[in-house]
Amino acid sequence: MEKFHGAYVAIITPFINGEVDEQSFVDLIEFQIANGTHGIVPCGTTGESATLSFDEHKQVMDLAIKTVAGRVPVIAGAGANNTLEAIDLSESAKESGADAILSVAPYYNKPSQEGIYQHFKAIAEAVDIPMFLYNVPGRTVVNIAPETTARLAGIDNIIGIKEACGCLEQISDVIRKCPEDFIVLSGDDFTSMPTNVIGGKGVISVISNVFPKGMAEMQEATFAGDWDRARQLHYQMYDMMKQMFAAPSPAPAKKALELMGVIREGLPRIPMTPIDDDNLANLKLAMKGLNLI
């Protein structure tokens, strides 16, 4: 498996009594590596980066990199809508020893495509570390257009994108317009298999938190051209993929990990709230379908 290809987990940040639960985080990383995850992505959306203080962000990045100890790559979430803050987080990730950073499109500000380009260009020029762009218009309200991604791909240390637009037409345009070695990772579990079919190189996955073995095997099957096996795994995981987003993420993933005994407490941090009883019942059904409980 080439570096930065395959199933990367958008890893949750466990909390206990309102603080980062370091022991559960270590246990979760060991669970991931033991089950074949190809890489770890701390401090992303699923890691509740929006509610982490700078010190907590640094704490989680440091602990992830120390625990992984070079066994798989670590892509550290380091994005912000304030360009100077994104540079600070990127510098922190480099100091911690991350293999690359994941930098989200500037949210809330609603910049133009030129503004998006200048934002990422400034980060890339300020911090010498491999960078993945992160396009998730459902959360940021801005879309990194394929033409903008292609412009940014011309900057040496911008090596790829997590494309969570959910649109195979846009993903196709990104792959078509960017250099052949530009790494396109799906940002949606649902599109991870078809993204690989059209030229993608993997996924940054939510379901991998709870079923890392299945997603890793599906990625490997696509790279081997074993489409029957890849489709089988896609549909095997489909109900669980739906449950991961039946309530605002990462609440379902955290509850599932608590039910599995991987982490001690599956509560998200406010303003995210725990899943309700109906979603919990559906989550348990999906988990039983994958023999997770």
Image (cartoon, helix red, strand yellow):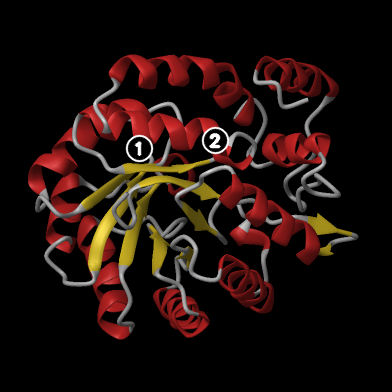
Residue 247 x %, y %: 67, 30
| Mark 1 nearby-residue class (10 Å; few <14, some 14–19, many ≥20) | many
Q: Looking at the picture, tell me which residue is in the foreground, 4 or 154.
A: 4
Q: Is residue 20 above or below residue 177?
A: below
Which mark is nearer the camera, 2 or 1?
2
Q: Is residue 197 above or below residue 45?
A: above
- Residue 49 appears in which quarter of the rendering? bottom right
- Measuring from the top left, give residue 84's x and y in whole percent: 42, 80
Rendered-image quadrant of the C terminus? top right
Residue with the mark numbered 2: 213
Kind of residue sitting beneath label 2: Lys
Marks 2 and 1 sit apart, C-alpha to C-alpha, by: 25 Å
Image: 187 above or below 69:
above
Q: Residue at x 45, y 50 (%)?
A: 38
| Amino acid found under the numbered disc labelled 1 | Cys
Task: Determine whether the residue tagged by mark 2 lies in a helix, strand or loop.
Answer: helix
Please give left or right for residue 68 compared with residue 90 in the image. Answer: right
Q: Position of residue 186 (x, y in %)?
A: 36, 40
Q: Observer-nearest residue: 136 or 286?
A: 286
Residue depicted at 46% across the width and 73% down the height: 98
- Residue 49 is labelled as none
Label 2 neighbourhood size at 10 Å, few (<14), some (14-19), many (20+)?
some
Q: Residue at x 27, y 35 (%)?
A: 223
Marks 1 and 2: in contact by CB < 8 Å?
A: no
Nearer to the camera, 91 or 260:
260
From the viewer's perspective, is residue 94 above or below residue 195? below
Location of residue 113 by image quarter: bottom left
Q: Position of residue 251 (x, y in %)?
A: 71, 39
Query: Between disc 2 and disc 1, whose residue precedes?
Result: 1
Which residue position is annotated with label 1? 165
Q: Is residue 74 left or right of residue 292?
A: left
